[in-house]
Amino acid sequence: MRRPGGRGRADRERPPTSAAEGWLDACVCLAPKPWDVAAGVALCRERGRDVLGADGRAFAFGSPVLAAGAPEVARSLAGLWEG
């Protein structure tokens, strides 16, 4: 999801970081690799954003999906994952 006024390329390359910074309301990453999302996950958690895995619980590396952002949006996005 892109929010109007988003940062374009940065939105695609660092989705959890973009959600942490408020450039995106939320993001979804499929098959996230730790080296791609670790910094964004830490920033989101530090700033009170939800970071959820496929089961709708706190994201852990190895989850097939990551949903991060504003709590209500991240919960909705994580709830769409069927595995």
Image: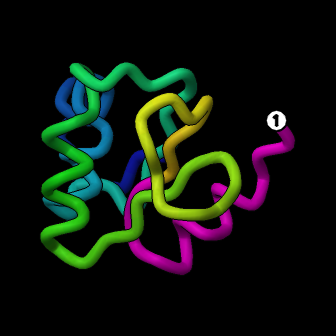
Q: Is residue 82 above or below residue 76?
A: above
The residue depicted at 85 percent of the width and 42 percent of the height is: 82
Judge from the rendering whether residue 11 lies leftward or rightward of residue 60; answer left or right.
left
Q: Please give the range of residues in magenta.
A: 68-83
Q: Within 10 angstroms of label 1, few (less than 14), some, or many (20 or more) residues?
A: few
Judging depth in this view, the residue of 41 and 1 nearest the camera is 41
- Name the secondary structure under disc 1: loop
What percent of the width, then of the height, locates residue 27? 44, 47
Please state which amino acid type lies under the numbered disc 1. Gly
Specify the quadrant of the image occupied by residue 17.
top left
What percent of the width, then of the height, locates residue 30? 56, 27
What percent of the width, then of the height, locates residue 65? 58, 36
Judging depth in this view, the residue of 5 and 18 nearest the camera is 18
Q: Is residue 67 above or below residue 61?
A: below
Q: Quadrant of the C terminus?
A: top right
The residue depicted at 20 percent of the width and 44 percent of the height is: 40
What percent of the width, then of the height, locates residue 38? 21, 36
Q: Is residue 12 above or below residue 44?
A: above
* Label 1 sits on residue: 83
Specify the quadrant of the image occupied by residue 7.
top left
